[in-house]
């Protein structure tokens, strides 16, 4: 029998980025015993890397802004595949969540009259993003962290959850994981579990994600029997760094374009004017003069540099393919010729330092080279909009791991607000659920023991496979075959590769001992990544259209039929199975918002 | 491709430096080379990292004797063939290889109060001028890499001070709260509380190593010391006490 420690909670939150912290704060405020588990140190989750801002229709800069406009922008940005109710809740509640962060100590940039300032971002009709220079995510996570540590929440840092468990009635009852530091196993028994594990883009080789983005929560939910929706919808952010090779994929904030930067090809042309889709033509400037005027005059049409991310990413991809790319296979992002040095350094300090230190490029005098990078999973756990409840009783999900909110493409700035709006909702949902439960549901001790033994098996095995090599091969096949532009035959190749990698992963060898052993950690994460890659690829095969972040070479353009369905993924004994199910339709009074335009 | 010659701490307290040759390419940073070492020669090499862009403060290590973020150190900084020595932060207990136990910092964080803001204005807003939040925003750039804590000789050379002393990172946090335009925390809970500020003798080691360029000593610690004296020592009252024997 393997050795493990046991902890008991009313609510266990997995993940300590913006969503997890906000969920834990909410559950704890209800007087519930709350545990918070995170893979990294507290405050290092992916939220810390968010740059541009947090979208909320506060109307501080443009009083014309309101939740209806934000709702409409979000739905259109998501190509109407969003869960309308989530998009509505998000648009309505974001301003309160910004105000709450300010109350907890966040120091946002100010308007001239002293209120919270808001900046322009892609797909948002008005300047709407509350921000702190270009380090808004740091401000959010630190604020939540500094509030959370005074709320009596138990925090388990550098602890990774590997499996969820249910009782005989199918209710969530616990989670098994391990301490990264000691390698020792730990069992959490809990009445409710909130997944706030973030994203999965570490399955691509060019990505903005840190090592943590291995889709743990997506895989945990799949194995727990939860429905997943629209896993094929992955955002390739248009502007990642492309050079030097070691920083390829690292994010360049959309704030560069929000603050006046423009994309150019190798001929110096502002090519985005050639890629204005019909859906956005009426509200997008078609001359450089009008586009440049828009920054200060919202009566003219917006610059195509700030089209939604999926449009910009495809345009960059097309320019590079047509031979009009930059020397290192991207395009140019120029703010140097458009804004003065002081302005750039004040508005974009971390971009300035990032390029100066990592690429030797002074963005106040030279263009940046940028290209698409796997950034964000729109798809994820299917949740009830108001409670964040998954289809498994007692299992909740908030933030990137949850699906629905962003449809097939997320607008920049909608992630940070999503985290706190639905983090809070998940905390409430879990707390309400827990009130109806007398005791922690039973846990199958034998299954727990089996899982722990399995977790430690890479040390005992005689395998020869290197986990780093397997991970790289997975990234390579996903990049090549399930990337920004997809086609059926390539995706079948990816599925074959995934299957063969899974066989090889069973023979993975881990050197050294269980203490802080990254090779072992990666071997365990790899299992999650392979399941997630399978779910994404199967979803992408099923959705025979192009919509938002999901672009099919063999099915260009959206279809009406696929616009009315979620692709739902479920784990079966034969792996992930996908099927189409109806997308909830919004009531007429909301649908009218789209008619008017 | 050139070869980097690394000297890396391996093991726990009873470990040792081991030497490795790792190929690298133009544009790589020290952390890339460490990752390549991990992927090709030492799969169990323990190293913390997250963002790889100087935003999260996870990959702090002592590189050639100075605490740095490994992700922001381009290999071009080191002449080819020169040995690059990489060690964990040494002020904190070692876990293994390049990973130290920084839990002390998280314990200290809990001792610092939260901000307590005045009530909102009637229209539901807080109003603060940008110039008044500029000071706090400088402090809130802190990415908690704990490099300033590592280099501070008050604890590095005297671990016995770790109980009484919160360290530069948390002086920055205290300064941020005490300079927040709307904070109402009483001084007894912040600057006067005694977080060991008096141990600091302003050698500016922390400021020198801060990867965020926060002027820790000049903008945080010295003003805090001044404020703390303002509160503790009122010369008029002191004179009054002497003359009239009142408290």
Image (cartoon, coloured by chain):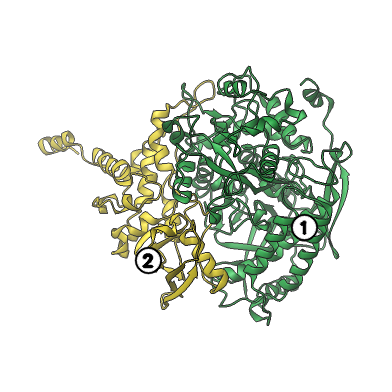
Tell me, yes or no, whether the two marked residues, 1 and 2, touch with CB atoms within 8 Å.
no
Residue toward you, B33 or B43: B33
- Asked whether residue B60 is in view, the answer is yes
Q: Position of residue A592 (x, y in %)?
A: 81, 23
Q: Which colour represents chain A?
A: green
- Please state, as top left, top right, bottom left or bottom right, where the C terminus of chain A lies in the image: top right
Q: Secondary structure at mark 2?
A: loop
Pointers 1 and 2 within a single chain? no
Packing grade of label 2 (10 A; few <14, some 14-19, many >=20) is some
**Mark 1 to mark 2 CA distance (whole Å):** 42 Å
Identify which residue is drawn at 68% across, 79% down. A463
Residue A222 circle label: 1
Q: Which residue is mark 2?
A: B90
Q: Is residue A111 left or right of residue A448?
A: left
Q: Residue at x 65, y 75 (%)?
A: A456
- The N terminus of chain A: image quadrant: bottom right
Q: Which chain is yellow?
A: B
Report the side of A309 relative to A228 (left or right).
Answer: left
Q: Secondary structure at mark 1?
A: helix
């Amino acid at each position: 029998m393997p050795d493990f420690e046991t902890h008991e909670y009313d609510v266990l939150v997995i993940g300590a980025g913006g969503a997890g912290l906000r969920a834990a704060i909410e559950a704890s405020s209800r007087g519930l015993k709350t545990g918070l588990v995170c893979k990294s140190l507290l405050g290092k989750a992916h939220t810390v890397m968010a740059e541009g801002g947090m979208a909320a229709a506060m109307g501080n800069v443009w009083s014309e802004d309101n939740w209806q406009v934000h709702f409409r922008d979000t739905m259109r940005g998501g190509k109407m595949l969003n869960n309308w109710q989530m998009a509505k809740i998000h648009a309505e509640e974001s301003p309160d969540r910004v105000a709450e962060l300010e109350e907890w100590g966040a120091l946002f940039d100010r308007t001239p009259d002293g209120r919270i300032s808001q900046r322009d971002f892609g797909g948002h009709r008005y300047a709407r993003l509350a921000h702190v220079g270009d380090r808004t995510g740091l401000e959010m996570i630190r604020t939540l962290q500094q509030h959370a540590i005074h709320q009596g929440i138990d925090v388990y840092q550098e602890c990774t959850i590997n499996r969820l468990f249910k009782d005989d009635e199918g209710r969530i009852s616990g989670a098994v994981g391990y301490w990264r530091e000691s390698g020792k196993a730990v069992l959490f028994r809990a009445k409710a579990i909130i997944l706030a594990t973030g994203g999965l883009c570490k399955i691509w080789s060019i990505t903005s994600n840190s090592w943590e983005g291995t889709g743990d929560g997506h895989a945990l939910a799949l194995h727990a029997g939860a429905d997943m929706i629209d896993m094929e919808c992955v955002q390739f952010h248009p502007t990642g760094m492309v050079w030097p090779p070691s920083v390829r994929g690292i994010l360049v904030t959309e704030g560069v374009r929000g603050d006046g930067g423009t994309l150019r090809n190798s001929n110096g042309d502002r090519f985005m004017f050639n890629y204005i889709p019909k859906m956005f033509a009426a509200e997008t400037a078609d001359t450089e003069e009008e586009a440049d005027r828009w920054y200060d005059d919202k009566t003219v049409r917006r610059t195509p540099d700030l089209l939604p991310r999926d449009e910009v990413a495809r345009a960059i991809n097309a320019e590079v393919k047509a031979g009009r790319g930059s020397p290192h296979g991207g395009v140019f992002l120029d703010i140097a010729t458009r804004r003065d040095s002081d302005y750039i350094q004040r508005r974009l300090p971390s971009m300035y330092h990032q390029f100066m230190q990592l690429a030797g490029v002074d963005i106040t005098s030279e263009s940046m080279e940028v290209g698409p990078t796997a950034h964000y999973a729109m798809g994820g756990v299917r949740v009830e909009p108001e409670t964040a409840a998954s289809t498994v009783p007692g299992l909740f999900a908030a933030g990137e791991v949850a699906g629905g909110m962003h449809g097939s493409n997320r607008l920049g700035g909608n992630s940070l607000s999503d985290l706190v709006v639905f983090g809070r909702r998940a905390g409430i949902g879990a707390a309400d659920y827990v009130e109806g439960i007398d005791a922690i549901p039973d846990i199958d001790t034998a299954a727990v023991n089996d899982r722990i033994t399995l977790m430690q098996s890479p040390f005992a095995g005689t395998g020869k496979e290197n986990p780093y090599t397997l991970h790289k091969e997975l990234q390579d096949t996903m990049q090549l075959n399930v990337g920004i532009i997809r086609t059926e035959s390539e995706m079948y190749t990816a599925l074959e590769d995934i299957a063969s990698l899974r066989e090889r992963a069973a023979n993975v060898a881990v050197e050294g001992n269980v203490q802080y052993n990254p090779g072992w950690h990666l071997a365990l994460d790899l299992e999650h990544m392979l399941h997630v890659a399978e779910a994404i690829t199967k979803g992408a095969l099923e959705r025979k259209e192009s919509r938002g972040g999901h672009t099919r070479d063999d099915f260009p353009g959206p279809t009406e039929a696929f616009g009315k369905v979620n692709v739902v993924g479920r784990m079966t004994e034969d792996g992930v199975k996908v099927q189409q199910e109806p997308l909830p339709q919004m009531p007429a009074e909301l649908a009218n918002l789209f008619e008017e335009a | 491709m050139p070869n980097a010659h690394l000297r890396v701490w391996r093991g726990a307290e009873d470990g040792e430096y081991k030497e490795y040759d790792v190929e690298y390419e133009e544009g790589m940073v020290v952390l890339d080379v460490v990752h390549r070492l991990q992927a090709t020669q030492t799969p169990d090499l323990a190293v913390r990292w997250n963002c790889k862009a100087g935003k999260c403060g996870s990959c702090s290590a002592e590189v050639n004797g100075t605490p740095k973020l490994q992700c922001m150190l381009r290999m071009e900084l080191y002449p080819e063939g020169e040995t690059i020595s990489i060690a964990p932060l040494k002020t904190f207990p070692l876990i293994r290889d390049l990973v130290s136990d920084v839990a002390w910092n998280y314990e200290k964080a809990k001792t610092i109060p939260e901000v307590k803001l005045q009530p909102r204005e009637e229209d539901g807003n807080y109003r603060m001028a940008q110039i008044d939040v500029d000071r706090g925003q400088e402090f809130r750039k802190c990415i908690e890499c704990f490099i300033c804590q590592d280099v501070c000789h008050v604890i590095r050379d005297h671990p016995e001070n770790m109980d009484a002393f919160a360290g530069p990172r948390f002086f920055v946090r205290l300064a941020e709260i005490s300079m927040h335009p709307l904070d109402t925390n009483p001084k007894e809970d912040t600057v006067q509380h005694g977080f060991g500020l008096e141990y600091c003798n302003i050698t500016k080691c922390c400021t020198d190593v801060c990867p965020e360029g926060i002027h820790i000593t000049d903008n945080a610690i010295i003003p805090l010391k001044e404020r703390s004296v303002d509160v503790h020592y009122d010369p008029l009252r002191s004179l009054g006490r002497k003359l009239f024997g009142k408290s």
